[in-house]
Image (cartoon, helix red, strand yellow):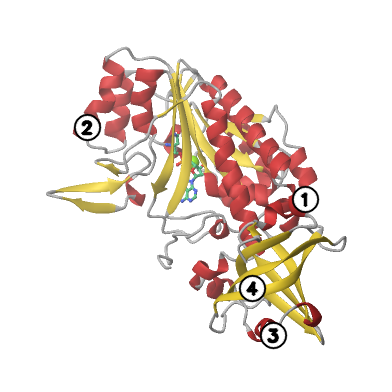
C-alpha cells in the first residue's frame, strides 16, 4: 500500500478526499451488522475509521471484528467529511494491517479508581484526558521558555547534586557522592544568584526534589520549577515580573489549547479573567482578611492550604502576598528595612484554591546580615562560603522567584490533584512505574 501516504490525525483536515494511511492503536470499537466503527488514536488525536463489509476483503472484516483494544494497526482508507465527528472527518477503510494484537487491555473506557490508574500510569497515558493535560503542560513549558528567551534572560542550568540545603534541611534527599554526602537539589536559586551577578537576568528550568512527607494534593517529591533571578531588581520589580509572566502563560494556553481545555471541561472564562494587575497584600493584611472571614490565623505562623484557599476565594485572579514574618521563610530572604521582623518575600496564590504557585523575593545582599541568618538557621557556614562571596564582590540588590510547573498545570487545567500533571508522578508512596 505504498501509494497511501502516512498522515497524522491532527493533520487529517488537509487531506479530505485523499487516500491516506493512519498508523496507530485501536482505542475503542463498536459494531453493527455490516459495519465496524473503529476509534483509532495515534497520539495526535482520535478518529473514527468505518469498516464496511462491502469495501474490504473478508479477512480484513474479520480482523476488524476480532482485534481487541490497544492493538496496533495501520489503516488505509479515504478521508471523508463527517459533520458529527468532533474533528470533522472520518476514514472510509479500504484495508487494515494488524501490527501487533494486544492482550486483554486492563484499562477499558469505563471508570477506574485512581490507585489502579496510577499503578498503570504507563498505559493510562494513552487516554484522551491525559493527552489533553500533557499537551497543556507542553504549551506551558514552551510559553515559559519563550517568555524568558524573549525578555533578555540567559538560560543557566543549575546542578542537581548539591552540597547544601536551599529550602530547609527537613526535605533533603541525601545520596552518596563518593566519600561525601550530596543532596538532590531543592532549588537552583543559590546558583542563579551567582549567575545573575555574572549575566544580569538569568533563569533555570529543571527538576527539583523534596522529601515531602506530606500526602497532599499539591505535593510531589520530584517536581519541575522555573527560577528567574535578576540583578538590580527589588521586590516590587520582582512582583511586576511575576504577574506579567503568569498573565502571559495563561493567555498562551487559551490561545493554543482551547480543544484540550474543553476535553477537561475547564471553565475558560475563569482563565480569561487572569489579567494584570494582580492584587498585592501584605502578610499582615492577609491575616486580617482571614479574620474577617472567620478564619483566625496567628501572626507569625505560615499559611497552609486552608488559609491559602480562603484568601484566594476573595479574588478571581492570583493574589500576591508579600512581607511574611522572617521566621516562616528561608535564610536568604532580605530583611525588610522598615520592620526587621519581616522578609521581603512574595508568594503568589492561584485562584480557586490551587494554592501557592510562586515563592520568591528579594535576597539578602548584606554580608553581615546574611552571616547572622545562616547562624540563626543552624546552617554550616563553610558550605555557603561561595554564596557569601557574592556579597563580598560587588553585591547588588537582586530578586527572583520559583514557579512550580505541576501546580500551575493543575490550576490552568482545573485538576484536583497534581499527580495527573506530570507523566510519571513521584510522591511519598509512589516510585513506580
Ligand atoms: O516556595 P518554594 O520553596 O521556593 C523556592 O524554592 C525558591 N528557592 C524559589 C526561588 O526563589 N528561586 O518553591 C517554589 C514553588 C512553590 O511555589 C510551588 O509552586 C512549587 O515550587 N513547589 C512544589 N510543587 C510540587 N510539589 C512540591 N513538593 C513543591 N514544593 C514547592
Ligand atoms: Mg514557598
Q: Is residue 25 above or below residue 213?
A: below
Q: Quadrant of the N terminus?
A: bottom right
The residue mark sitting in front, 2 or 1, is: 1
Q: Residue at x 71, y 86 (%)?
A: 58
Q: Residues within 10 Å of mark 4 (few under 14, many from 20)?
A: many
Q: How far apart in space, not on screen, are marks 2 and 3 (Cα)?
A: 71 Å
> How far apart, in angstroms, are the residues tagged by discs 1 and 4?
31 Å
Q: Earlier in the sequence, mark 3 or mark 1?
A: 3
Q: Label 4 belongs to which residue?
A: 26
Query: Which tag is nearer the camera, tag 2 or tag 3?
Result: 3
Q: In the figure, 402 relative to 196: above or below?
A: below
Whether tag 3 and tag 1 are in contact, CB under 8 A, the answer is no
- For ligand 1, tell me if the residue under mark 2 lies within 8 Å: no
Mark 4 lies within 8 Å of ligand 1 (Cβ measured): no
* Mark closer to the chain start, 2 or 3: 3
Q: Mark 2 or mark 1, which has the lower sequence index?
A: 1
**Towards the viewer: 111 or 101:** 101
Residue 295 visible in the picture: no
Q: Which residue is mark 1?
A: 267
Q: Quadrant of the C terminus?
A: bottom left
- Whole-angstrom CA distance, mark 2 to mark 1, is 50 Å
Query: In this orientation, which residue lies closer to the viewer: 204 or 255?
Result: 255
Would you say 218 lies left or right of 46 here? left
Describe residue 292's horizontal placement relative to residue 107 as left or right: right
In this view, 209 is above or below 348? below
Dot 3: element: helix
| Residue placed under numbered mark 3 in the picture | 65
Q: Residue at x 69, y 85 (%)?
A: 65
SS for dot 2: helix
Q: Secondary structure at mark 4?
A: strand
Residue 52 falls in image quadrant: bottom right
CA distance for labels 3 and 1: 39 Å
Amino acid at each position: 500500500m505504498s501509494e497511501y501516504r502516512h498522515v497524522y490525525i491532527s493533520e487529517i483536515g488537509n487531506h479530505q478526499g485523499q487516500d491516506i494511511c493512519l498508523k496507530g492503536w485501536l482505542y475503542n470499537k463498536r459494531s453493527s451488522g455490516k459495519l465496524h466503527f473503529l476509534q483509532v488514536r495515534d497520539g495526535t488525536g482520535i478518529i473514527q475509521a468505518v469498516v464496511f463489509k462491502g469495501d474490504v476483503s473478508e479477512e480484513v472484516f474479520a480482523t476488524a471484528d476480532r482485534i481487541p483494544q490497544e492493538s496496533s494497526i495501520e489503516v488505509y482508507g479515504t478521508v471523508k467529511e463527517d459533520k458529527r465527528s468532533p474533528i470533522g472527518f472520518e476514514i472510509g477503510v479500504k484495508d487494515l494491517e494488524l501490527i501487533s494484537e494486544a492482550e486483554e487491555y486492563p484499562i477499558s473506557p469505563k471508570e477506574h479508581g485512581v490507585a489502579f490508574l496510577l499503578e498503570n500510569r504507563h498505559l493510562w497515558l494513552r487516554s484522551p484526558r491525559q493527552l489533553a493535560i500533557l499537551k497543556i503542560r507542553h504549551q506551558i513549558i514552551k510559553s515559559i521558555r519563550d517568555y524568558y528567551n524573549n525578555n533578555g534572560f540567559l538560560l543557566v542550568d543549575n546542578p542537581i547534586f548539591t552540597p547544601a540545603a536551599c529550602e530547609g534541611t527537613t526535605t533533603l534527599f541525601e545520596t552518596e557522592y563518593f566519600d561525601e554526602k550530596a543532596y538532590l537539589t531543592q532549588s537552583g536559586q543559590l546558583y542563579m544568584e551567582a549567575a545573575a551577578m555574572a549575566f544580569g537576568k538569568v533563569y533555570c528550568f529543571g527538576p527539583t526534589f523534596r522529601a515531602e512527607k506530606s500526602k497532599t494534593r499539591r505535593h510531589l517529591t520530584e517536581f519541575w520549577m522555573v527560577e528567574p533571578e535578576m540583578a538590580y531588581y527589588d521586590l516590587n520589580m520582582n512582583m511586576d515580573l511575576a504577574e506579567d509572566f503568569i498573565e502571559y502563560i495563561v493567555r498562551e494556553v487559551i490561545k493554543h489549547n482551547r480543544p484540550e481545555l474543553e476535553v477537561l471541561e475547564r471553565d475558560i472564562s475563569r482563565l480569561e479573567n487572569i489579567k494584570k494587575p494582580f492584587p498585592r497584600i501584605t502578610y499582615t493584611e492577609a491575616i486580617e482578611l482571614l479574620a474577617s472571614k472567620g478564619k483566625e490565623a496567628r501572626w507569625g505562623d505560615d499559611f497552609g492550604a486552608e488559609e491559602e484557599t480562603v484568601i484566594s476565594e476573595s479574588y478571581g485572579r492570583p493574589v500576591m502576598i508579600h512581607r511574611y514574618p522572617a521566621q516562616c521563610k528561608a535564610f536568604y530572604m532580605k530583611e525588610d528595612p522598615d520592620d526587621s521582623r519581616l522578609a521581603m518575600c512574595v508568594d503568589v496564590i492561584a485562584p480557586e484554591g490551587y494554592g501557592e504557585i510562586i515563592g520568591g523575593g528579594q535576597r539578602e545582599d548584606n554580608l553581615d546580615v546574611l552571616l547572622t541568618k545562616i547562624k540563626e538557621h543552624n546552617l554550616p557556614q563553610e558550605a555557603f562560603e561561595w554564596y557569601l562571596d557574592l556579597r563580598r564582590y560587588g553585591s547588588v540588590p537582586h530578586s527572583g522567584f520559583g514557579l512550580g510547573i505541576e501546580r500551575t498545570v493543575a490550576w490552568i487545567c482545573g485538576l484536583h490533584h497534581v499527580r495527573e500533571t506530570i507523566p510519571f508522578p513521584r510522591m511519598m508512596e509512589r516510585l513506580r512505574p
